[in-house]
Image (cartoon, coloured by chain):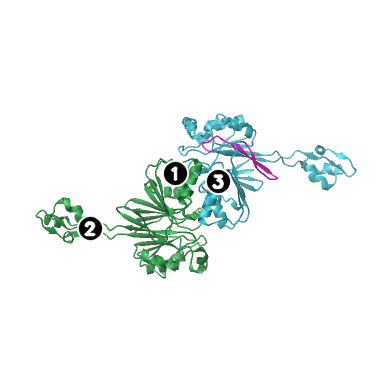
Chain colours: A cyan, B green
Amino acid sequence: MELTILGCHSATPRIDTHPTAQVLNIKNHLFLIDCGEGTQVLLRKYKIKFSRIKHIFISHLHGDHFFGLVGLISTFRLLSREADLNIYGPKGIKEIITLQMKLADSWTNYGLYFHELSSKQSDLIYEDEKVEVHTIPLDHRIYTNGFLFKEKLSERKLDIIKAQKANIDKAYFPKLKQGFDVENESGEWIKNETVTLEGPPAKSYAFCSDTAYNQNIIPLIENVTALYHESTFLEKHHHLTQTTKHSTAKQAARIAKEAKVGKLILGHYSSRYKDLEDFKREAGAEFEHVELAKSGKTFSI
Amino acid sequence: MELTILGCHSATPRIDTHPTAQVLNIKNHLFLIDCGEGTQVLLRKYKIKFSRIKHIFISHLHGDHFFGLVGLISTFRLLSREADLNIYGPKGIKEIITLQMKLADSWTNYGLYFHELSSKQSDLIYEDEKVEVHTIPLDHRIYTNGFLFKEKLSERKLDIIKAQKANIDKAYFPKLKQGFDVENESGEWIKNETVTLEGPPAKSYAFCSDTAYNQNIIPLIENVTALYHESTFLEKHHHLTQTTKHSTAKQAARIAKEAKVGKLILGHYSSRYKDLEDFKREAGAEFEHVELAKSGKTFSI
């Protein structure tokens, strides 16, 4: 899993700060998470092969998280995309996009599918052979979801020499990797764990933006390999978190600590702050493994 | 009048090419014309005092001409704008913007007024003491207007010495500047032209994008000081003008020549062309006064 940050500031785009958008690469499948204005330019700037994006997840309908979506959809049309594109986002997103397509008389020449979300529970919203995506209900001013990307348990590692010694036909090797016991050529049952080893651990990534401090998410994100948690403010502006329903760096770190995550990535910084190291310092006092999101930075998860 | 080009390429934003947006400064009143994705960043980059924009004119509802509008409106809200903002654009534009505001639960704290256009005639759509704005119906794939900005005839220049010699009370000086004859202190009527001179000539600017070659616009733009006319293509791609309803540089120059404009500014270049000087050469063969639009360039009109 590799996470590339396109934009990680709150509010509106400026010359050097960009609103939320990030690309998660899971075994060469690209997932776009949020799509602020200008995302398509950043995809080009950071040389992401963006025609390979097949699924876009939108957390909520504040502009800094989706105003770039209609432009990206429209660019895909101009680039003669043929592959289906799936959009997961709050109810209403389909109307916003299709209204603009209707008025421009510009329908896509590829399949565009909307998966509108309105549940307040954590739901499985996407699944393929390698990954599951679940929503993480967040506490913001309007209906908002985070997203949890979980690799499925990877295959067991086959010890070929042991399997051959156990006289197992090659045709059963895929079954062994899937964890099943199999019959060998002499008709004996061979226990899976005698010829296989545990595969590499499954990785997971949780995206939580935008949200007030919300302990309800802890059971959902427990032990994730990496957590992106918004930190719009520093503690000195704690009083602003109530009305805006945002978090401080310290609050993000507390969530990370209580959920025992592997690594915390901070982002969604308010543009009032000049030195982002202050976010790292503040969170670092609560939780050891803190990193700062930055446009163009790629995190290996 | 001063025209600053923000973006002048067709289609979608890239790292170095931006979709249509320009700011017309008429005696320190700023008018924004079209608003492609990323316009708000370019307004900052070119240090335009964009809080002073009170009127935005949108030619048509293709994304490269208005996808930046909703973001700009939303940024004005975040910047606590108080002044009214007026949007002139095709029918449907109000629904697009207000739908997004409704779903974000983010209404503006300033007056936002939509003036939706659907007439196929040239209409006067805005007027103040200094300027008139008229639509220029264009021939494109969807309903599209260009815009003609005309300074009102400026005041006559008062020859104060002559006016004093003619024994005219100061209170009548504004009347004289407006072109009226007045009575002097002895009760004699003084002919206006004996104490005033003609003022500076009124300037005019016509914005024509996007459009196929369309001679119908000539009477509307005759003798304008400057004409921005799209030139998406060069003549070698003339065959593309029919289906796309765009123009070549040569066609733009023909319109400029027949309308006897002062200066032709080319723009809306297709991203297939590397050397924009080819546009200038092609148009220059037909019409002498040709300039190329370029992001960040300011034209004095």
Total residue callouts: 3
Residue A64 image point, x, y percent = 50, 43
Query: Could you say which disc has been placed on residue B75 in the image?
Result: 1
Instruction: Work out whether disc 3 and disc 2 sit on a shared chain.
Output: no
Q: Nearer the viewer, residue B145 or B123?
A: B123
Residue A135 image point, x, y percent = 61, 39
Q: Image check: B16 left or right of A123?
A: left
Q: Chain of mark 3?
A: A
Q: In this figure, which residue is indicated by the disc labeled 3?
A: A93
In which quadrant of the rendered view does residue B267 lie? Answer: bottom left
Instruction: Work out whether disc 3 and disc 1 sit on a shared chain.
Output: no
Q: Helix, strand or loop at disc 3?
A: helix
Instruction: Work out whether disc 1 and disc 2 sit on a shared chain.
Output: yes
In this rendering, the label closer to the viewer, 3 or 1: 3
Distance from the alpha carbon under mark 3 to that under mark 1: 20 Å
Q: Is residue A134 magenta?
A: yes
Q: Looking at the image, is A90 positioned above or below residue B139?
A: above
In this rendering, the label closer to the viewer, 3 or 2: 3
Q: In this figure, which residue is indicated by the disc labeled 2?
A: B156
Which contiguous range is marked in magenta? A121-142
* Residue located at (32% from left, 55% from top): B131
Residue B122 image point, x, y percent = 38, 61
Task: Identify the amino acid type marked 2.
Answer: Arg
